[in-house]
Amino acid sequence: MTVIVDQPNFGIEVDQKDKNSEGLILDGGFAVPNANAFGHDFRDYEAESERQEGVEIFYKTNHIHQTYEFVKRMREEYMKLDKVKMSIWECCELLNNVVDESDPDLDEPQIEHLLQTAEAIRKDYPDEDWLHLTALVHDLGKVLLLPEFGELPQWAVVGDTNPVGCAFDESIVHHKYFKENPDYNNPAYNSEFGVYEKGCGLNNVFMSWGHDDYMYLVAKENKSTLPSAGLFIIRYHSFYALHRSGAYKHLMNEEDEENLKWLKIFNKYDLYSKSKVRVDVEKVKPYYLSLIQKYFPEKLRW
């Protein structure tokens, strides 16, 4: 079934520059490159001025249309998992057909970014094999851009994510455009808690729809044995308002607090591992196939 979303197909993600103020070394000795694949600072959208209009258009479209009802409709549709059946590795290879217009740091095939992230983490956390696999699969939900998955527009697949059903925190990039969102003036949705309760747990919160939430649903509904922290990373790795600005903590429970520690570790590798250092896919493939076999069924419903 094709899900039709009649909106412009724009997509550029933006955020403040993520500088490592303590030098070029992160956890366990991972060396942060000085520049991304294009020779610019990571997540630096000022490096190419022509990007700026696209940034604004993307987030304006995203913020206007990511309503509570839209997210509810998308989750109900995609929770059916009736699009295709394929393995995790088949999906990794399929992802090479996807162009993420929101990523200013990468011009290599998508599978190489996944493996760059996974291999960097594997080096520093050799005993956490679930984290290696989480890195490999975290972006697979971007297949939503492909025809067989509904061919959703970029604004409904990539970019930063945020809760819907409660007030939009001012730390969210281009917050001003939420004023045109129907939920912005709806008293059911525009208070601090909205439809939620204090400490209800992020698992009970609807997030703006995109590749994060989709891959989370795929893993959860296919009964992946990844630990709670792995599923948390998959679902919230684009939730910058939380893991960079500390917003929405009033909705978190104790399990969320523990999982957030792992998400903050993961996020450094997700961002800073993007470089011209190529990964020999065939060399590392057997290791990741063994992890897929350990944590996922052979064929998944998508």
Image (cartoon, grey):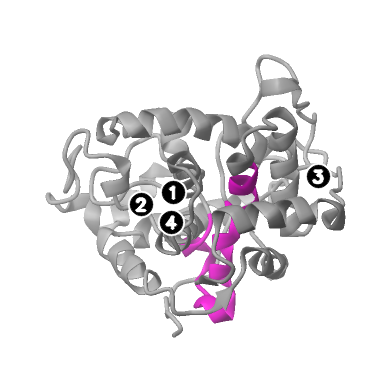
Q: Of the residues under marks 4 and 2, which one precedes in the sequence?
A: 2
Image: 30 above or below 97: above
Q: CA distance from mark 3 to mark 4?
A: 27 Å
Q: Is residue 143 magenta?
A: yes
Circle nearer the viewer, 4 or 2 = 4
| Residue at x 26%, y 59% (from the top left corner) | 68
Q: Which residue is mark 4?
A: 213
| Residue at x 48%, y 56% (from the top left corner) | 224
Q: Which residue is mark 1?
A: 161
Secondary structure at badge 2 equals: loop
Q: Which residue is mark 2?
A: 207
Amino acid type shown at disc 3: Ala
Q: Of the residues under marks 2 and 1, which one precedes in the sequence?
A: 1
- Asked whether the residues under the numbered discs 2 and 1 touch, taking CB atoms below 8 Å apart as contact, a structural biologist would say yes
- Asked whether the residues under the numbered discs 4 and 2 touch, taking CB atoms below 8 Å apart as contact, a structural biologist would say yes
Q: CA distance from mark 2 to mark 1?
A: 7 Å
Secondary structure at badge 4 equals: helix
Residue 69 lies, in percent from the top left, at: 25, 64
Instruction: Characterize the local packing of mark 2: few (<14), some (14-19) or many (20 or more) Cα atoms within 10 angstroms.
Output: many
For residue 41, side relative to residue 194 (left or right) = right
Q: Nearer the viewer, residue 263 or 291?
A: 291
Circle nearer the viewer, 3 or 4 = 4
Instruction: Characterize the local packing of mark 1: few (<14), some (14-19) or many (20 or more) Cα atoms within 10 angstroms.
Output: many
Q: CA distance from mark 4 to mark 2?
A: 7 Å
Q: Main secondary structure of the magenta part?
A: helix
